[in-house]
Image (spheres, grey):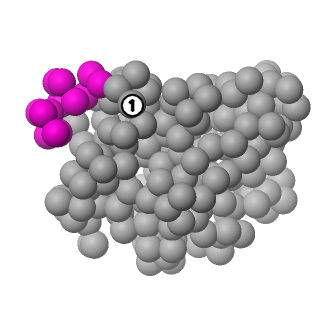
Amino acid sequence: MFQYHTIPVTAFQQNCSLVWCDQTLEAAVIDPGGDIDVIEWELERLGLQLKAIWLTHAHIDHAGAVAELARKRQLDIIGPHEGDRFWIAGLPQQGAMFGFPPAEPFEPTRWLHDGDTVAIGQEVLQVRHCPGHTPGHVVFHAPQAERCFVGDVLFAGSIGRTDFPQGNHQQLIDSIVQRLWPMGDQTVFIPGHGPESSFGRERQTNPYVGNT
Ligand SMILES: [Zn+2]
Ligand SMILES: [Zn+2]
């Protein structure tokens, strides 16, 4: 079965998630923005073997610890979409701007595209490209568990910012309506910040995307 555990990391309380297959106890970490010691403590506590880093997008609070963690544990870096290449290159400047520990750029082992799949143990997740917050933003959908890891695309009661370079409000709305809603109202999403919600609840109550 597919399992996950979310750990808020960095001063931005970014929802880093461990996702794993309980048949093999192999795990991937989604968006290790920082606090590697906390992430490793949770891996130990849960008895998991970390195999890969999966990235929704390359903002500092999501990707700040990727280079260090990948090097330390010799992990593949999967994602995001290549549209975020300039954000990865700018990680040192992002870190300095927001007072983060020094962050290094990196080269993903594999860029992701809409319709790709990623696997951990016996579990397979679907990748959807959801640009708007950043041009290379992707989400990870686990239909077997009715869960979706959406990064900063959608939040409980809000949506991602689009006032960054290459942010695009209409594109973000289109990503949410055309790529998230079809996953089903019952699907629970894990946003990059704040509490979980379901797509159905957001369709009814979210002021930015209600009635869409
Ligand atoms: Zn972001
Ligand atoms: Zn964020």
Residue 199 or 167: which is nearer the viewer? Answer: 199
Residue 186 or 45: which is nearer the viewer? Answer: 186
Q: Which residues are magenta?
A: 200-212
Residue 165 visible? The answer is yes
Q: Is residue 172 left or right of residue 69?
A: left
Above or below, comparing residue 200 to residue 150 in the picture: above
Residue 71, image x and y in percent? 79, 62
| Magenta highlight on residue 101 | no
Callout 1, which amino acid? Gly
The N terminus lies in quadrant: top right
How many numbered markers are drawn? 1
Q: Residue at x 43, y 43 (%)?
A: 150
Q: Residue at x 25, y 66 (%)?
A: 167
Q: Is mark 1 within 8 Å of ligand 2?
A: no
Residue 93, image x and y in percent? 43, 71
Disc 1: which residue: 184
Above or below, comparing residue 124 to residue 68 in the picture: above
Above or below, comparing residue 154 to residue 205 in the picture: below
Residue 38, image x and y in percent? 67, 33
Residue 44, image x and y in percent? 82, 28
Mark 1 neighbour density, 10 Å: few (under 14) some (14–19) many (20 or more): few
| Magenta highlight on residue 203 | yes
Q: Is residue 197 left or right of residue 168?
A: right
Above or below, comparing residue 127 to residue 37 in the picture: below
The C terminus lies in quadrant: top left
